[in-house]
């Protein structure tokens, strides 16, 4: 087997990359990663220098690791700024570091990509050995695998990676025929509040329009981008992705890109941007030109749930954080990232910190689970997602 480091995803054929076990995640597809690079969104100038590892056997791609050399920690959604400060206080450099992830995307998925039928354990080990060799070559402080699916945690821990627990809020389809079937599982008062929330949007004269990548002409896409960018500008930051990224995404992945436009008297006043996987809808970005009562909840959450029920998707991941999602029927879910620090003393200190942090997060998962809006008999249901308890008791 031959291991190579790619400076761009364009150096490998899309068909070969997409034949790996991407788990149905659109963010790991060649088209998504290439759009991020070609549009200038995830490039060296923005702190995302591609260092993708690929493993070939007799000229055939059998394994890969989407990997980036980072000189900052922005756009990762796994916060290690305190670690970087601690390094600096001791006269050490935390950057560069190596990050296995999809840029700007806090969605769980495989980070060790293996061709179907290939020896998964062996290929995963070779990829991790390659990442460690690259780390030493670059003088990087560490290797990080963000939002790792549970099935790959064991392999990473065996290679010395430290597990870090966090919480997101996901919706799960229990075979609903329509949105009202979903609301029927709420307690009476929570169901009433949800209906009132949706009614307020329609009473303001707002209508929702659903568009996919192929429906987005140049003008509409510019409107979508401007609305989404307003959220970033309001916080004093530029958007992570450029307009050209979304143009490429609409062209290359028209069936995966979906937007919900809120129209008021013929004018688009809000948007939510989604990506669709094989069995999961991913909520990504939101923006609005005005302050409309309950519109954020309708556009970003209720519309996504409606879509999943209609399309028969099993899960809806609306993004990171946000306790307000609980009242809309999203349950707390454990998510994991894995970290390997080369400096022995810092690795030991971070391991102790992560153990303490994990106790806090486990308590938070339970406390958040106690506030879901479902009837008492359903709220206590110990559902499982990818082998991880949604509601630990």
Image: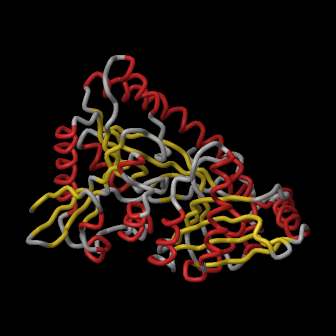
Q: Residue at x 65, y 62 (%)?
A: 226
Left of 252 or right of it: where is 207?
right
Q: Position of residue 290 (x, y in %)?
A: 80, 57
Q: Is residue 22 above or below residue 296?
A: below
Task: Classify residue 197 by image quadrant.
Answer: bottom right
**In the current view of this chain or complex, which residue is farthest to the bottom?**
214
**In the current view of this chain or complex, which residue is farthest to the top?**
90
Q: Position of residue 121 (x, y in %)?
A: 20, 57
Q: Is residue 125 above or below residue 357?
A: below
Q: Residue at x 34, y 34 (%)?
A: 95
Left of 206 or right of it: where is 115?
left
Q: Where the C terminus falls, by quadrant?
A: top right
Q: Position of residue 2 (x, y in %)?
A: 10, 61
Q: Is residue 202 above or below residue 151?
A: below
Q: Residue at x 35, y 56 (%)?
A: 151
Q: Position of residue 307 (x, y in %)?
A: 65, 75
The front one of 86 and 120 is: 86
């Amino acid at each position: 087997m031959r291991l190579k480091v790619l400076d761009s995803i364009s150096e490998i054929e899309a068909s070969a990359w997409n034949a790996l076990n991407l788990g149905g995640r659109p963010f790991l597809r060649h088209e998504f990663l290439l759009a991020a690079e070609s549009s200038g969104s995830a490039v060296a100038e923005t702190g995302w220098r591609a260092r993708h590892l690929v493993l070939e056997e007799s000229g055939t791609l059998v394994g890969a690791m989407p990997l980036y050399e980072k000189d900052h920690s922005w756009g990762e959604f796994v916060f290690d700024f305190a670690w970087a400060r601690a390094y600096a206080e001791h006269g050490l450099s935390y950057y560069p570091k190596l990050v296995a992830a999809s840029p700007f995307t806090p969605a769980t998925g495989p980070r060790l990509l293996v061709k179907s039928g290939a020896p998964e354990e062996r290929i995963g080990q070779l990829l991790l050995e390659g990442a460690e060799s690259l780390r030493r070559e670059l003088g990087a402080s560490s290797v990080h695998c963000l939002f790792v699916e549970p099935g790959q945690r064991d392999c990473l821990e065996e290679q010395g990676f430290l597990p870090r627990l966090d919480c997101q809020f996901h919706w799960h389809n229990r075979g609903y025929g329509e949105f009202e079937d979903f609301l029927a599982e709420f307690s009476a008062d929570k169901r009433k509040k949800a209906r009132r929330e949706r009614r307020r949007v329609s009473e303001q004269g707002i209508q929702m329009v659903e568009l996919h990548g192929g429906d987005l002409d140049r003008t509409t896409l510019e409107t979508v981008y401007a609305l989404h960018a307003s959220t970033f500008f309001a916080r004093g930051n530029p958007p992570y992705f450029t307009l050209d990224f979304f143009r490429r995404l609409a062209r290359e992945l028209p069936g995966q890109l979906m937007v919900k436009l809120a129209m008021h008297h013929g004018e688009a006043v809000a948007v939510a941007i989604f990506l669709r996987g094989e069995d999961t809808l991913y909520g990504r970005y939101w923006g609005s030109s005005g302050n409309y009562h309950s519109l954020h909840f309708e556009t970003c959450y209720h519309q996504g749930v409606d879509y999943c029920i209609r399309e028969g998707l099993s899960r809806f991941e609306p993004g990171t954080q946000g306790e307000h999602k609980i009242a809309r029927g999203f349950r707390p879910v454990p998510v994991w990232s894995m970290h390997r620090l080369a400096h022995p003393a810092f690795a030991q200190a971070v391991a102790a910190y992560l153990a303490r942090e994990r106790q806090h997060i486990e308590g938070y998962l339970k406390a958040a689970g106690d506030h879901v809006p479902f009837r008492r008999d359903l709220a206590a249901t110990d559902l499982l997602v990818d082998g991880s308890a949604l509601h630990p008791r």
